[in-house]
Amino acid sequence: MKVLITGGAGFIGAYVAKALAERGDDVVIVDNFSDLVYGADLKRRRLAELVGKGARLIEGSILDAAVLDEAMKNGVDVVLHLAAHANPKTSLDNSFEYTRVNVDGTLSVLEATRRHGVNRVVLAGSSSVYNDEQVPFKEDSYPLKPKSPYGASKAAAEVYCQMWHELYGTKITVLRFFSVYGPWGRPDMAPMIFAERILKGEVLEVNVDERQRDLTYIDDVVPAVLAALDTELDFEVLNIGRGEPVVIRELVSLLERAAEKKAQVKDRPTPPGEMKITFANIDKAKDLLGYEPKISVDEGAKKFVIWLKNYLASK
């Protein structure tokens, strides 16, 4: 199978590119190494360490039709569209840029599939589209109620995909990811921030009110994405989480235990744009993809801290 991964230098993208290359698939990556949310150096190192020469890299923006034409010119079986600006907090001050990349960028990818006759797309969705007053989150929950420009942009991208499917018959699977973490993960997310500050003996700030997150380890996410790429569905939206929310202060405790160091915790007011809870109902993904998360947050924290110690030592 020939797979185009947009955002392939990102956290999920690099792991999936590695898995596809290892099983013999032909992988093309498009990435512009944006540093809006976090530095491009980590993305380049991640890509080199995980994927190496297992994929062809085209450096450029998904908003550039010529870049996408180059990526698709020799034929593509399926597009895994992961390229997007993430992080609800960063989106508060960059709403136009988030709309440009996450919404216009998705439309640019969809237009390219139409030009090149590509009939299958897997889109990275987000738990940030949900109304966090309705738990657990089900794919048919309504209304969607994003609390940030990021969440709104991901919801809009989904709407474009559904419309595209109805207009052109493109088969599209939307995977709504829930707080994916692990080695080579995003440095703007709580697991990385907390673990690094614990290891360095620095103060970490935790919201005064008890937020909960459905933390999902990367080794559980990759098989789900591969299954979505291998399973030809018509149009489906699927939650990819653990279905077991963890209170953020409990995450701190698990990281303390894994690091064998006590955290210096400081309370902070909850910033705008943050959801109270993320909580995935994963029944649909189990039924359609055979998805079965296996790694508990306790085990995931241990694996992650072991990697982070080595990573920090190598910097």
Image (cartoon, grey):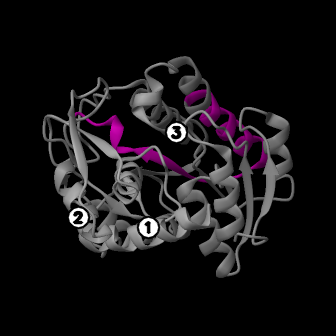
Q: Residue at x 64, y 69 (%)?
A: 50
Q: Residues within 10 Å of mark 3 (few under 14, many from 20)?
A: many
Does the magenta portion include 129?
yes
Helix, strand or loop at disc 3? helix
Under mark 1, the amino acid is Ala
Q: Quadrant of residue 21?
A: bottom right
Mark 2 or 1, nearer chain start: 1
Q: Which residue is mark 3?
A: 161
Q: Position of residue 43 (x, y in %)?
A: 65, 53
Residue 224 - label: 1
Q: Quadrant of residue 114?
A: top right
**Compared with residue 88, is residue 82 higher up or lower down, i.e. above or below?**
below
Q: Could you say which is closer to the camera, residue 171 or residue 142?
A: 142
Mark 3 or 2, nearer chain start: 3
Under mark 3, the amino acid is Cys
Q: Residue at x 70, y 55 (%)?
A: 44
| Range of residues picked out in magenta | 103-131
Would residue 292 be visible to someone looking at this image? no
Q: Position of residue 29 (x, y in %)?
A: 73, 56
Mark 3 or 1, nearer chain start: 3
Would residue 166 be visible to someone looking at this image? yes
Q: Which residue is mark 2?
A: 254
Residue 12 horizontal side relative to residue 56, left or right: left
Q: Quadrant of residue 60?
A: top right
Under mark 2, the amino acid is Leu
Which callout, 2 or 1, points to the residue nearer the camera? Answer: 2
Name the quarter where the N terminus is drawn: bottom right
**Compared with residue 235, is residue 97 higher up or lower down, i.e. above or below?**
above
